[in-house]
Structures are given as C-alpha cells and as structure tokens.
C-alpha cells in the first residue's frame, strides 16, 4: 500500500485552518499570564488609594484601569482579569471597600469587573 500524497495547496489550507482554530480557542480561553501581569501591575498603581494611604486616585491608576478594561472584551477575560486584580488587592493587605468600589467613578470609567472587596466573587461577572 502506497502512502497518500496531498497537494501542497491542500496541506497549506489545512495548516491555515488549524492555526486559525487554535487562535480562536486561545482568544476565548480568557486572560493569559501576561494579561494577568499587566492587570496586576496596573492595579498596583491603585493600592495606595484603596488601602487608604493616598488621599487621591493617582493618574497612573486610572490609566492602568483603562488599559485593563480594554483587555477584556468577553466574559471569560473579565472573570480572569478580575481574579488577577483580586489577588493583587489581597496582596495589598488592608483594603477600603468603599474606595475600591469608587475607583471606576473616580477614574471616569465604566468598569463592571473590578473587585470591590477582598471577598468579591469574580466568577459571578457576566
């Protein structure tokens, strides 16, 4: 029995389809480690304010939160980034839930997946 030979065009189309399918699965899988690092770094600019150490929200905090918001077009990404930010919030220690809840408004952002307290449930984000 001789091996089956496929034309180079058929092989190329099959490879392109496989790459596109893998990219789509990756996009739907949520935040990757680099996205999580970006979200944590962005929120770290806010920790002084939410911990009550800073009187005003630093501009870097608002810029970072705006960047994170843009990284989360889908529900899975929002939940994943929320969990990343929550871990940074917990690492910060003392969190004023009122200040955390007020961050989006203070930054002029509509931000439905920002954790507002240490017991925030990111899995409930739509």
Image (cartoon, rainbow, N blue to C red):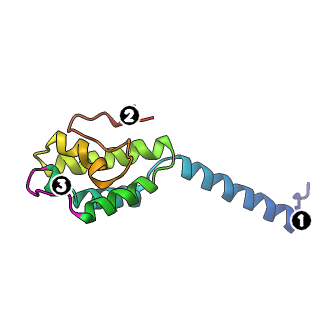
Magenta stretch, residue numbers: 51-58
Residue at (29, 56) in percent of width and height: 40
Point out the residue furthest to the bottom here: 8
Whether residue 37 is visible to the viewer of this picture, yes or no, is: no
Q: Who is closer to the viewer here, 49 or 27?
A: 49
Magenta span has 54?
A: yes
Q: Are marks 2 and 1 in contact (CB under 8 Å)?
A: no
Point out the residue furthest to the right here: 1
Q: Nearer the viewer, mark 2 or mark 1?
A: 2
Give left or right: position of 9 versus 115: right
Estimate the x, y position of residue 77 in percent, counting from the top left. Answer: 45, 47
**Placement of 6 over or under 88, stated as above or below:** below
Estimate the x, y position of residue 56 in percent, counting from the top left. Answer: 16, 58
Give left or right: position of 47 versus 122: left
Q: Are marks 3 and 1 in contact (CB under 8 Å)?
A: no
> Which callout, 2 or 3, points at the residue further toward the start of the chain?
3
Mark 1: secondary structure: loop
Magenta span has 42?
A: no
Q: Are marks 2 and 3 in contact (CB under 8 Å)?
A: no
**Placement of 110 over or under 6, stated as above or below:** above
> Which callout, 2 or 1, points at the residue further toward the start of the chain?
1
Residue that numbered label 1 is attached to: 7
Residue that numbered label 3 is attached to: 47
- Marks 2/3: CA distance? 22 Å
What label does residue 123 carry, if any? 2
């Amino acid at each position: 029995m001789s091996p089956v030979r496929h034309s180079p065009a058929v092989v190329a189309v099959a490879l392109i389809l496989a790459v596109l399918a893998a990219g789509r699965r990756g996009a739907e899988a949520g935040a990757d480690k680099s996205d999580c690092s970006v979200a944590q770094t962005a929120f770290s600019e806010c920790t002084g304010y939410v911990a009550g150490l800073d009187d005003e929200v630093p501009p870097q905090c608002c810029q970072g939160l705006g960047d994170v918001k843009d990284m989360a077009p889908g529900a899975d990404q929002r939940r994943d980034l929320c969990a990343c930010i929550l871990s940074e919030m917990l690492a910060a220690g003392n969190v004023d839930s009122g200040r955390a809840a007020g961050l989006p408004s203070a930054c002029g952002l509509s931000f439905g997946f920002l954790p507002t307290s240490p017991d925030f449930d990111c899995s409930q984000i739509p």
